[in-house]
């Protein structure tokens, strides 16, 4: 296991690197789903308002429509719940913003309320792990609503428009369910298999990863590949555990569970793994065919019992998950408020642009926040130039204005998975065009204000991240190390038993894998913080090495069972 975890004393200047910040990645496998969903959710309300001559109300319908961007990786039962909560959260933020706007026009008060809303939205989105686009869309809508003149009598009608569009967005998000009801869980399983295959290939290329060590010796040259593999496996388990354990869908769930088990086995013993077999299984899951079989069902009985044992576990209460996020919430509130105040001091008419820029910066640590700041500035400034090219066409008529916004909406979601800055190139002109739904505005003024607010928001927001230190990061690393040690000890005790209780070893093995995944994420997050105390690097490395050795021992125990399956066999389960 690599021990290259930056210490808290590493010079901040060395972390302000631009290397790789703007590098393009491969697009998401389902990049077209949020892109198409966004257009399908936004287009009907906007076109209806255009036909009615009330395009000035589009901001309220877009508040609900943009909820369609969320939860595309979740199984449909979980997606339904998540989207419902997102819509309710969006409505709550908009309601606070509209009522505040109706009670006062004091810009300082409005910025303050917007900053507090942004902090709450950031904390809740991170604590519930709602996934991309996270708090940014919620903050953009609520902050913009603060600066739209309102009366109390108008608030119910505007909220009704947002609610109606939110209901439509919910339907759009759930629309694929009748066609591919098992699509999300099949994709998650395929990603776990591919990640395990990638680690097996990388380990084999350096002659590492034998069963005896599980690829966990001092010379493991591929900690990133292994961490990615375990993260993909954990995501797959979380996806599958969101499905019913009984009923018609349970057959599909159990067939996919067996494949995820094989991905776990491959991660613990990469040298004994056939990567092509894993990739063949993953490829078979991409389409609508039958789910591949790993072997006779009895061979996997203990693993499935282990999954059932995990179902008894409950997530920590929300307030406990919010506690560690306090520094991030304080950063968000302070950074957004100061960015908005700075924009007001410069005489900018839309301080919420600076506020939203600051809100979009905050990531798990200061180093990642710096990277996002660079991406945001580059993307927004390039987007301002794109707006200059598009504006003459959009100003030919309101219909073209709406169509340009829809095209940019699609482009933003299609490109943002390549890199955040590339998506921002489309988001920026779209936001500028939306401001013209209520009436034409001088392009030069819009471009100047947006550029200035971007620079102000990025600078002030990043400085707030540096000033507000996260001293709890080191404590969380200590806690994660302790949790990993305890999980390893539990698994080791079961390994020492000649016949552990059915499912107990597998549940312990999964608990250990989850603890090691959390340890790696916590250590990497803490390593990107500044001004904190030194991290227990040696303890982290030793805990990971011992934990992965124990995982490999569990694999050896599992390997004694016969696997009579072949990669060409399939479960008789359709998507």
Image (cartoon, grey):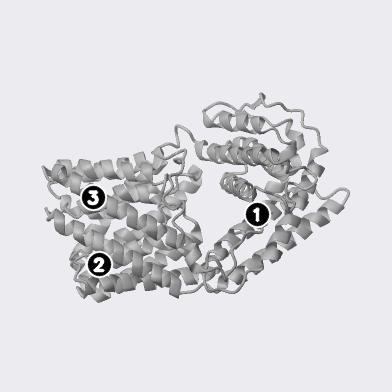
In the rendered image, residue 420, in percent from the top left (x then y), is placed at 39, 51
Mark 2 or 3: the one toward you: 3
When the figure is inspected, residue 110 is found, relative to residue 562, above or below; the finding is: below
Mark 3 touches mark 1? (CB < 8 Å)? no
Residue 292, numbered circle = none
- State which tag comes first along the sequence, 1 or 2: 2
When the figure is inspected, residue 162 is found, relative to residue 355, above or below; the finding is: above
481 left or right, relative to 418? right
Do we see residue 220 in this rendering? yes
State the CA–CA distance, disc 1 to disc 2.
43 Å
Q: Secondary structure at mark 2?
A: helix
Viewer-closest of 536 and 565 = 536
Q: Secondary structure at mark 1?
A: helix
Do we see residue 353 in this rendering? no
- State which tag comes first along the sequence, 2 or 3: 2
In the rendered image, residue 252, in percent from the top left (x then y), is placed at 60, 35
The single residue placed furthest to the top in the displayed view is: 568
Residue 351, numbered circle = 2
Residue in view at x 19 percent, y 71 percent: 347
In the rendered image, residue 475, in percent from the top left (x then y), is placed at 61, 71
Viewer-closest of 531 and 393 = 531
Residue in view at x 44 percent, y 56 percent: 18
Residue in view at x 20 percent, y 50 percent: 433
- Which residue matches tag 1? 514
Mark 2, Cα crowd under 10 Å, few <14 / some 14-19 / many 20+, is many
Mark 1, Cα crowd under 10 Å, few <14 / some 14-19 / many 20+, is some
Mark 3, Cα crowd under 10 Å, few <14 / some 14-19 / many 20+, is some
- Which residue matches tag 3? 385
239 left or right, relative to 389? right
513 left or right, relative to 349? right
State the CA–CA distance, disc 3 to disc 1.
45 Å
């Amino acid at each position: 296991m690599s021990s290259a975890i930056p210490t808290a004393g590493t010079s901040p200047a060395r972390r302000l690197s631009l290397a790789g910040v703007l590098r393009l990645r491969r697009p998401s496998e389902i990049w077209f789903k949020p892109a198409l969903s966004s257009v399908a959710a936004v287009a009907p309300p906007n076109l209806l308002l255009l036909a009615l001559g009330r395009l000035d109300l589009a901001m309220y319908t877009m508040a609900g429509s943009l909820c369609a961007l969320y939860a595309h990786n979740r199984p449909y039962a979980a997606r339904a719940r998540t989207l419902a909560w997102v819509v309710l959260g969006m409505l709550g933020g908009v309601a606070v913003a509209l009522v505040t706007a109706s009670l006062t026009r004091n810009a300082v008060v409005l910025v303050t309320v917007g900053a507090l809303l942004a902090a709450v939205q950031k904390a809740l989105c991170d604590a519930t792990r709602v996934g991309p686009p996270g708090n940014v869309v919620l903050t953009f809508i609520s902050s913009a609503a603060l600066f739209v003149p309102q009366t109390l009598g108008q608030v119910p009608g505007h909220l009704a428009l947002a609610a109606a569009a939110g209901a439509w967005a919910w339907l759009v998000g759930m629309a694929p369910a009748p066609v591919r009801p098992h699509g999300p869980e099949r994709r998650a399983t395929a990603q776990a298999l591919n990640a395990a295959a990638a680690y097996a290939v990388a380990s084999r290329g350096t002659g590492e990863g034998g069963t005896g060590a599980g690829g966990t010796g001092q010379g493991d040259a591929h900690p990133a590949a292994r961490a990615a593999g375990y993260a993909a496996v954990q995501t797959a388990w979380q996806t599958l555990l969101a499905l019913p354990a009984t009923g018609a869908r349970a057959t599909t769930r159990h067939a996919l569970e067996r494949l995820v088990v094989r991905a776990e086995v491959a991660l613990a013993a990469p040298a004994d793994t056939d990567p092509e077999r894993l990739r063949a299984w993953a490829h078979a899951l991409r389409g609508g065919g039958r789910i591949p079989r790993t072997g006779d069902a009895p061979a996997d009985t203990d693993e499935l019992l282990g999954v059932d044992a995990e179902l008894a576990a409950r997530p920590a209460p929300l307030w406990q998950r919010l506690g560690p996020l306090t520094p991030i919430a304080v950063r968000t509130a302070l950074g957004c408020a100061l960015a908005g105040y700075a924009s007001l001091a410069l005489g900018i008419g839309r301080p919420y642009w600076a506020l939203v820029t600051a809100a979009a910066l905050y990531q798990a640590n200061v180093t990642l926040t710096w990277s996002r700041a660079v991406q945001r500035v580059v993307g927004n400034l390039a987007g301002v130039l794109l707006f200059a090219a598009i504006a003459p066409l959009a100003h030919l008529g309101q219909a073209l204005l709406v169509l340009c916004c829809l095209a940019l909406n699609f482009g933003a979601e299609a490109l943002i998975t390549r890199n955040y800055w590339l998506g921002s190139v489309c988001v920026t002109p779209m936001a500028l065009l939306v401001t013209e739904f209520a009436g034409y505005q001088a392009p030069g003024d819009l471009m100047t204000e947006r550029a200035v607010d971007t620079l102000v928001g990025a600078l002030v927001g990043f400085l707030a991240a540096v000033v507000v230190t996260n001293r709890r990061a080191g404590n969380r690393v200590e806690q994660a190390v302790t949790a990993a040690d305890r999980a390893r000890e539990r698994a080791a005790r079961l390994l020492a038993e000649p016949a552990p209780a059915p499912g107990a070893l597998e549940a312990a093995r999964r608990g250990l894998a989850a603890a090691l995944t959390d340890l790696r994420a916590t250590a990497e997050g803490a390593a990107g913080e500044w001004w904190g105390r030194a991290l227990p690097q040696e303890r982290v490395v030793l805990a990971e090495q011992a934990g992965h050795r124990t995982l490999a021992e569990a694999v050896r125990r599992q390997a004694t069972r016969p696997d009579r399956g072949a990669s060409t066999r399939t479960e008789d389960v359709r998507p």
